[in-house]
Image (cartoon, helix red, strand yellow):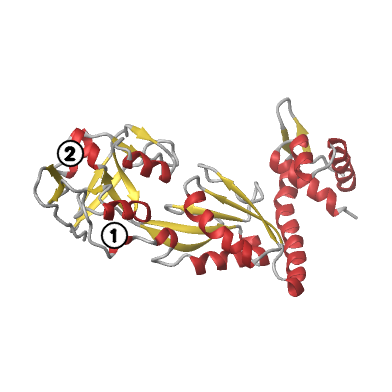
Amino acid sequence: MLDLNDLRVFERIAALRSFSAAARALGMPKSSASRSIRRLESELGVRLLQRTSRDVVPTEAGTALYQRCITILAGVDDTVDWISSLGRGPRGMLTVSAGIGAGPNILAELLPVFSRQYPDVTINVDLSSRHEDLVREGIDVGIRIGPMPDSQLIATKLGEMQAYLCASPAYLERRGTPQMIEDLKMHDLIGMAGNNGRPRAWTFKNSGETVTIEQQPRICVNCAVTIHRLVAKGAGIGNVAGYMSGPDLVAGKLVRLFPEWRTPPVEVHAVFPSHRELSPVVRAFVDFLKDFSRPGSGWQNDPIKDARLEVTPGLTVHGQGRASTGREEPEAHVPR
């Protein structure tokens, strides 16, 4: 009979393409991992792994076994978790993946509450600018911001964020205020790179009209929090999520440009592999995310939707975001 532990060792080696990395992940000597593979190959009568000068590559038989191991081992783990939860509630390790910006903006707000509700769950958070392969890297739940590509993952929508085109009063005083949406091409833009590594285009809509601004930003960064700080410090013009820019807009620390032009809202999803759907820990975490991701709270708290903007004293906002300095009384601007 096959040893389940040998299958676990094989799955980690095939996923990580390394005996050493798999042994470290499993907390066992490399020699023990090698013996597990020899036993498994002897039992099955076929070679499963091919060593090269750089890594370890599954053979055709190894690839077929690896794909089935993922489902088999996940099913075993889910069953153990489920039985354990019947008397004690969700417990065990939860691995969460999120983008760099989602760490301080979403998870740092929600995880303390989740930890108090589920004291037997240990949480490992992996923040990265890339979208990891959840199955291969053993991640239970991923937080994804932006369009969802087609995949075999299950996606649960948590909400959406509206961004506003902003600049600081200091930047507008130094560089002047763009009078038309196309004038953005003559300004310092603070942008974010897309999944292909190229800068993301900015799309604006106004009463059925659509304008796309495609330009190399002066500064390109993969963190929404950093974009907010750069714009607030006068580095340039950028799209800043409402829950971050709203308080600064209300306080006059930022100026909203072209309020009649809107960018499409950005959706936020929780994603997880289908074979983890019945895991008590995953189910508890996803349900928690849905319950605590409500419009008007946390990262969906957008004061601009309901508040009148107070501009910085000495700065008047006109029409399409044109600003002037002087002694005239500041005007309030109501975004639409």
x, y (%) of residue 79? 75, 66
From the viewer's side, name the closer residue of 287 and 236. Answer: 236
Most extreme residue toward the left is 328
Mark before the other along the chain sequence, 1 or 2: 2
x, y (%) of residue 152? 56, 56
Q: Callout 1 environment at 10 Å: few (<14), some (14 to 19), or many (20+)?
A: many
From the viewer's side, name the closer residue of 232 and 131. Answer: 232
Answer left or right for 133 relative to 146: right
- Tell me, yes or no, if residue 177 can be seen here: yes
From the viewer's side, name the closer residue of 69 and 143. Answer: 143
Q: Amino acid at mark 1?
A: Ile
Q: Which residue is mark 2?
A: 183
Residue at image coords 18%, 41%: 182
Q: Which residue is mark 1?
A: 304
Q: Amino acid at mark 2?
A: Asp
x, y (%) of residue 44? 86, 47
- Tell me, yes or no, if residue 154 can be seen here: no
Q: Nearer the viewer, mark 1 or mark 2?
A: 1
